[in-house]
Amino acid sequence: MKSELAHSIGTVYFSHGKESGPWGDKIKRLAQVAEAKGFVVYSIDYSGIADPDQRVQKLLASYTSEPGCLILVGSSMGGYVATVASETLKPQGLFLMAPALYLPGFLNQDPIPRAGLTDIVHGWKDEVIPAEHSIRFAHKYGAQLHLIDGDHRLISQIPFIASVFSSFLDQVSLGEYP
């Protein structure tokens, strides 16, 4: 699904988690933030695709080159998908929420974020993916990391995440990153 604006400054691709869908609460809110800033928004539907690496292939196949910044956003398994896809797409921004990194059964055990700026939000009380995985990843690759009071779904922190995402989009669109 896609939303369009006349004068886009870039494109945001959302990748949802294993147990959610393309327009869950987090993605809907973050899509509003992106659209308000002039981004075109796509949210890939991975329903029926349990294998994370098949999801990566679907994202790569769904990608269409458009003018402006490319931003990949992923939540949980979608975080893994966005990170692995970044190795090929080389987006200006990679925004991850409780990313499923360093998990058994995933083909790429150490995906390298190939983005101008990488931001991670992870809940201290995550019962599915330990926050230590995001700490390890952020430390290794110099990503910005926001550890917050939340569980895996991060639903109680959507307003905060939207604020962080808004600042992230500003940084990326202005090219203000290392």
Image (cartoon, rainbow, N blue to C red):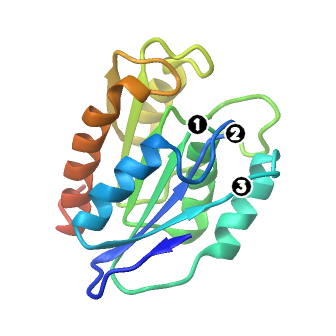
Q: Amino acid at mark 2?
A: Lys
Q: Kindly indicate the quadrant of the structure image that contains residue 149.
A: top left
Q: Nearer the viewer, residue 112 or 82?
A: 82
Disc nearest the viewer among 1 and 2: 2
* Lateral position of residue 107 relative to residue 22, left or right: right
Q: Which residue is mark 3?
A: 46
Q: Residues within 10 Å of mark 1 (few under 14, many from 20)?
A: many
The structure residue drawn at horizontal position 72% and vertical position 66%, both measured from the top left corner, is: 58
Q: Position of residue 78 (x, y in %)?
A: 60, 46
Asked if labels 2 and 1 touch by Cβ distance under 8 angstroms, the answer is: yes
Q: Sequence-wise, which precedes: disc 1 or disc 3? A: 3
Q: Position of residue 75 (x, y in %)?
A: 53, 41
Q: Residues within 10 Å of mark 2 (few under 14, many from 20)?
A: some
Q: Nearer the viewer, residue 90 or 77?
A: 77
Q: Residues within 10 Å of mark 3 (few under 14, many from 20)?
A: many
The structure residue drawn at horizontal position 28% and vertical position 56%, both measured from the top left corner, is: 33
Q: Amino acid at mark 1?
A: Ser
The structure residue drawn at horizontal position 78% and vertical position 28%, both measured from the top left corner, is: 104
Work out which quarter of the rendered image holds the N terminus and state it: bottom right
**Number of the label disc, if any, that sits on residue 76:** 1
